[in-house]
Image (cartoon, rainbow, N blue to C red):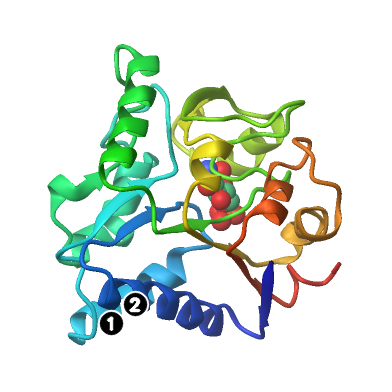
Amino acid sequence: MRIITFETSDALAVQCADIFAELLRSAGAPVLGLATGASPVPTYKELIRRYKAGEISFRNATTFNLDEYCELPKNDKNSYFSFMHEQLFDHVDIKEENVHILNGNAPDLKAEAQSYEARIRSAGGIDLQLLGIGTNGHIGFNEPDNKFTKETFVVELAQSTVKSNSIYFTDGAMPKHAITMGIGTIMAARKIVLIATGRSKAAAIRKTVLGDVTPACPASILQFHPDVTLLLDEAAASQI
Ligand code: GLP
């Protein structure tokens, strides 16, 4: 695990955007795994700035998002479909047909999960997977459990996740289920970058970096990945 600590979230975002920019420039058809949440927002802003400055293009890129809520209309302001379009896709030259976001309203969610895995495989696998981390150590929506998950699946959200994310659901109840890439899907990415900022992530980062590899802290599995970089601010790094 490579760990880099930054004084500001802007400096962190520049470094993260550098990693994306290098892949966008060097790969003929880069496959990006993308994340939602507050953590990647400064990175997406920096990528948009670089696109507008003519430094990078998403023209040949394909994207796969980590997860999506179930039973939340696609165009709801809190859906990850809306989030990704507002925060990144609407501002760059990505082709809509190359954007893949799980459909949490699919009539057959098991079939949706299998088709997502097949789409990732047929794109040649994920070159670079961006991750945030939950305060409970979740990645994507892989909640603490007694086993590591394999492929994309439907999950019941942990109480702590409902508590953390319900701040965004000011107009209605937060969904209790989501569909997410599994730990196996995430671990199959060739390169992984995890972003964490703020003191609320410090304990999860300590367990991820220094703790046992255990499904009780899903992110701890990253210790076994050959190419993981953690980009942290000083508060998130304060316990390691
Ligand atoms: C959500 C997402 C995760 C994200 C996490 C942290 O639950 N499903 O992919 O990493 O929360 O979010 P934030 O960056 O807002 O703290």
Q: Residue 55, how many percent across, how many down? A: 23, 85
Residue occupying image coordinates x 30% and y 48%:
124
- Does residue 129 appear anywhere in the picture? yes
- Disc sitting over residue 21 in the figure: 2
- Tell whether label 2 touches label 1 (CB within 8 Å): yes
Q: Three-letter amino acid code at disc 2? A: Ala
Q: Is residue 234 left or right of residue 64?
A: right
Q: Residue 4, how many percent across, how many down? A: 66, 78
Residue 177 vertical placement versus 94 (above, below): above
Label 1 packing within 10 angstroms: few (<14), some (14-19), many (20+): some
Label 2 packing within 10 angstroms: few (<14), some (14-19), many (20+): some
Q: Does the beta carbon of the residue at mark 2 sit less than 8 Å from ligand 1?
A: no
Q: State the residue position of label 1.
A: 50
Residue occupying image coordinates x 77% and y 71%:
237
Residue 222 vertical placement versus 80 (above, below): below
Residue occupying image coordinates x 41% and y 76%:
17
Q: Three-letter amino acid code at disc 1? A: Arg
Q: Secondary structure at mark 2?
A: helix
Q: Residue 144, how many percent across, how many down? A: 72, 34
Residue occupying image coordinates x 43% and y 71%:
43
Q: Nearer the viewer, residue 205 or 125?
A: 125
Residue 155, by quadrant, is top right
What is the CA distance from the residue labelled 1 to the residue labelled 2?
Answer: 9 Å
Tell me the quarter of the image containing the C terminus.
bottom right
Q: Is residue 179 left or right of residue 187?
A: left
Of tags 1 and 2, the one toward the viewer is 2
Q: Secondary structure at mark 1?
A: helix
Residue 17 vertical placement versus 197 (above, below): below
Q: Is residue 60 left or right of residue 239?
A: left
First reached walking from the N terminus: tag 1 or tag 2: 2
Residue 150, by quadrant, is top right
